[in-house]
Image (spheres, rainbow, N blue to C red):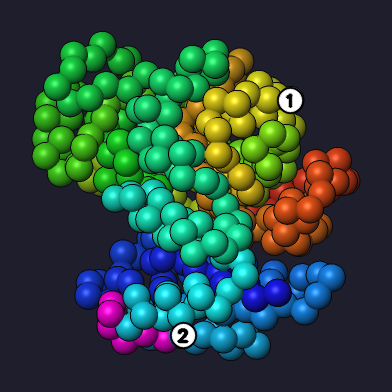
Amino acid sequence: MRLFIFEFISSGYLLDQTLPDSLVIEGDLMLRCLLNDAVEVKWKESIEICTLRDYRLAPLNLPIQVYTPRSTNEARAHWQTALQWANMVLVVAPETEGVLATFSQAVVAAKKILLGCRLPAIQLTTSKRQTALQLASYQLPIIPSYQARQAFPESPNGWIVKPDTGAGCEHTYLCNERAMIRQYLPLIPNPIIQPYIVGEAASLTLLTDGINCRLVAVNKQHIQVDNHHQLHLNTLTVNLFYSFASRFQAVVECLPKAIPGLWGWVGVDVLITDTDYFVVEVNPRLTTSYVGLKTSIQANPLSLLLHLLYSDEVFTMPLAHEAIFLGNLHDIK
């Protein structure tokens, strides 16, 4: 088997610009964990692995094929070479500007096995607002979103202003007054406005084949607000909140129906209150929590993903749920 693992931010596709600090740190962590898992995975046949690597980043030092482009044109050429070589492709990329959709569709067009969500699911979840409307139609609790031109109600705790199609906490601000919203709106592409709800920021790590769905981890997101009112994901504790798992049974049951085309590892950001929860957004891909997932569940997450192609045993096999604190993401090397 020939497996191509592609992480967009660290791949060399951004060689014509400065790498975005937070996204490259998280992307590089996910890539390294995926590649280590691929090297260690026990499979019915030998696995050959390749990836792309921006030459400005530290070498990987793994027994795999690494293409190291020095220009965006070289990155595109290496992508095509790796795509034609591979049997299976796993894409990690932001939904922003259609990046995840573009690369995923290229895998399908090349008639390779895509180890990820299908295009309809990616296209829907790229918009936080459209995702919320779809989930609300399945009676799942969501936070109402308003476009910049819409009237929006008062909120006792302020408002969150963020891009409708952003990745992570990028361009996400906490505004205590309406005047602050007007100040930040010009800085945010395609902004939406949401009431700020006090609660625990968390994420769900789900595994699905588009029909069955399993909640594997409930993670605490350690989010900080800086002096410019911008939100930052400082770190995660994987599976710290698994005791809340039963609260999310409706999400597990409804999500594959509400968003056709979900497949593989999926992340769902949620807000947990004293008595309830709200779905914030759906990420149609693996997320930063993957970094601590293997240690938490005592199983190789990439192996589970590969088994999803052939068996539904992954939905019933026993898994651990140990809480794993990742430390400051910006300090991890």
Q: Position of residue 229 (x, y in %)?
A: 26, 41
Disc 1 target residue: 246
Query: How many other residues sit within 10 Å of disc 1, few (<14), some (14-19) or many (≥20)?
Result: few
Q: Secondary structure at mark 1?
A: helix
Query: How many other residues sit within 10 Å of disc 2, few (<14), some (14-19) or many (≥20)?
Result: many
Q: Which of 37 and 194 lies nearest the eye of the viewer? A: 37
Q: Secondary structure at mark 2?
A: strand
Q: CA distance from mark 1 to mark 2?
A: 44 Å
In the displayed structure, 247 sits above or below 291; it is above
Q: Amino acid at mark 1?
A: Ser
**Residue drawn at 61 percent across, 31 percent down:** 256
Along the horizontal axis of the image, is 38 left or right of 181?
A: right
Q: Amino acid at mark 2?
A: Tyr
In the displayed structure, 181 sits above or below 288; it is above
Magenta extent: 68-73
- Let me know if residue 33 appears in the view: no
Q: Which of 272 and 270 lies nearest the eye of the viewer? A: 270
Q: Which quadrant of the structure image shows residue 262?
A: top right
Q: Which of 188 and 110 lies nearest the eye of the viewer? A: 110
Q: Which quadrant of the structure image shows residue 56?
A: bottom left
In the displayed structure, 53 sits above or below 126; it is below
Q: Which of 145 and 66 lies nearest the eye of the viewer? A: 66
**Residue drawn at 23 percent across, 14 percent down:** 152
Disc 2 target residue: 67
